[in-house]
Amino acid sequence: MPIRPFLAGEPFDPEIIAKMSLALESACEALGLKLVDDPATRLVAEKIIALVQRGVRDAGTLTTMTLRDLTKESGML
């Protein structure tokens, strides 16, 4: 699932959108989430978007950092 539905009109380069989409798919798979527009998937997408806005551009790094942030927030560390 592309990340486009979660971008809320924010302009991103097509190449970074592809990387964000890959990160979304990977993170959701790792978390056992379906790629649908629901609150959990939206939270993952928002984390990825925030990381890109901070300058992270690698799909693998986006996935890793997203999972780490979500794990910290849930108190699992």
Image: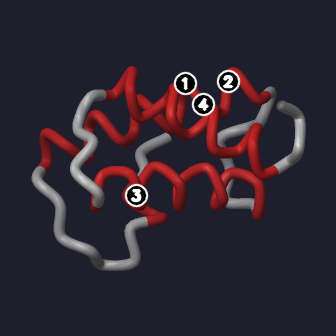
| Whole-number angstrom distance, CA of label 2 to CA of label 1 | 5 Å
Return the residue at label 2: 29
- Which of the 4 image quarters holds residue 40? bottom right
Disc 1 marks a residue whose amino acid type is Ser
Mark seen at residue 26 = 1
Depth check: give the residue in front, 45 or 76.
Answer: 76
Q: Earlier in the sequence, mark 3 or mark 1?
A: 1
| Whole-number angstrom distance, CA of label 2 to CA of label 4 | 5 Å
Query: Which residue is depicted at the point 76% across and 63% down?
Result: 39
| Whole-number angstrom distance, CA of label 2 to CA of label 3 | 18 Å
Label pair 3/1, CB-CB below 8 angstroms = no
Return the residue at label 4: 27
Label pair 2/4, CB-CB below 8 angstroms = yes
Where is residue 30 shown, x and y percent of the image? 70, 21
Disc 3 marks a residue whose amino acid type is Ile
Query: Which residue is depicted at the point 39% across and 21% down?
Result: 60
Q: Is residue 45 left or right of residue 53?
A: right
